[in-house]
């Protein structure tokens, strides 16, 4: 009988093969791409199984679920918070997350800084979430935003200067209706501009189950994989 571990092992092997093929196509080392297993709505037992299979990075997008899962899993994992984050959740998130990938405003950076400085011994790694299409109605900091709080470069500077935070790089999702290659090419250009001012901000988190190949082609260092890894199943909610 096929076990859940067997299912996850087969899916993980296929995702790793996809990453390997994508890297080979552009002469990249597969070791330069980190797989972040997005385990939202899946049980802590799946996280334990993935850790046993060699997964090192796990992503969650809701604080209540993420906090409970991180507390329940006694494995040496790197926890990424990848969802939209309200400022009033900052105090909770900094207690378990190693990386927050979705900082898109100066105010959110400030809230995380205040919480991290009080509640953490080590800096919290932060990625600035980039809005590729510049739509202010959706999440993401914007290149040349009319609202200073959401301006990409101001947000990055705020993170860089904030106590308790460390600027790691950028994160983005390809907008609906866009060709992923176009979106990730634009992101690559913005990431290069960011590194010109912040040389240590080398992380580019981009690509999910349906478009990881395009993300790797344009320099993603992290890919966030949920469905292709964990499969389609009933949610916990």
Image (spheres, rainbow, N blue to C red):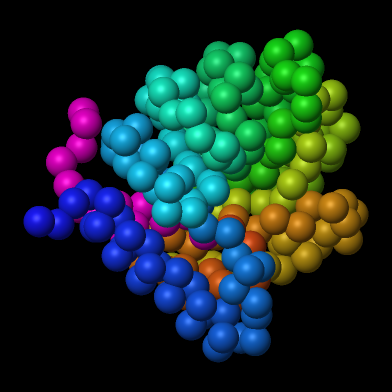
Residue at the far top: name it: 118
Above or below, 106 relative to 136: above
Residue at the far front: name it: 1
Q: Position of residue 178 (x, y in %)?
A: 43, 68
Q: Where is residue 216 in the image (x, y as percent from the top left)?
A: 56, 72
Q: Position of residue 165 (x, y in %)?
A: 78, 31
Bounds of the magenta segment: 223-237
| Residue 140 seen from this side | no
Q: Residue at x 79, y 52 (%)?
A: 201
* Front in this rendered view, residue 126 or 123: 123
Quadrant of the image occupied by residue 193: bottom right
Quadrant of the image occupied by residue 163: top right
Q: Where is residue 89 in the image (x, y as percent from the top left)?
A: 54, 18
| Residue 200 seen from this side | yes
* Quadrant in the picture for the C terminus: top left
Residue at the far left: name it: 1
Magenta segment: does it hold 225? yes
* Front in this rendered view, residue 148 or 78: 78
Q: How many marks?
A: 0
Q: Which residue is drawn at 76% across and 57% down?
A: 202
Above or below, 96 relative to 227: above
Left of 12 or right of it: where is 204? right
Q: Residue at x 78, y 30 (%)?
A: 123
* Quadrant in the picture for the N terminus: bottom left
Magenta segment: does it hold 19? no
């Amino acid at each position: 009988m096929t076990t859940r571990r067997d299912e996850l092992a087969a899916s993980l092997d296929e995702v790793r093969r996809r990453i390997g093929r994508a890297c080979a196509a552009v002469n990249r080392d597969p070791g330069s791409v980190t797989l972040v297993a997005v385990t939202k709505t899946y049980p802590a037992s799946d996280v334990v199984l993935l850790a046993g299979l060699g997964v090192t990075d796990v992503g969650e997008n809701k604080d209540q679920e993420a906090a409970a899962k991180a507390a329940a899993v006694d494995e040496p994992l790197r926890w990424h918070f990848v969802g939209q984050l309200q400022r009033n959740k900052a105090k909770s998130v900094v207690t378990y997350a190693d990386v927050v990938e979705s900082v898109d405003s100066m105010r959110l950076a400030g809230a995380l800084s205040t919480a991290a400085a009080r509640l953490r011994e080590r800096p919290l790694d932060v990625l600035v979430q980039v809005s590729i299409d510049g739509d202010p109605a959706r999440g993401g900091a914007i290149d040349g935003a009319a609202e200073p709080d959401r301006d990409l470069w101001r947000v990055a500077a705020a993170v860089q200067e904030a106590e308790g935070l460390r600027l790691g790089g950028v994160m983005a999702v390809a907008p609906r209706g866009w060709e992923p290659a176009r979106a990730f090419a634009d992101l690559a250009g913005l990431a290069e501009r960011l590194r010109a001012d912040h040389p240590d901000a080398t992380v580019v988190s981009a690509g999910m189950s349906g478009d990881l190949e395009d993300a790797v082609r344009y320099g993603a260092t992290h890919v966030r994989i949920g469905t292709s890894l964990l499969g389609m199943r009933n949610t916990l909610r």
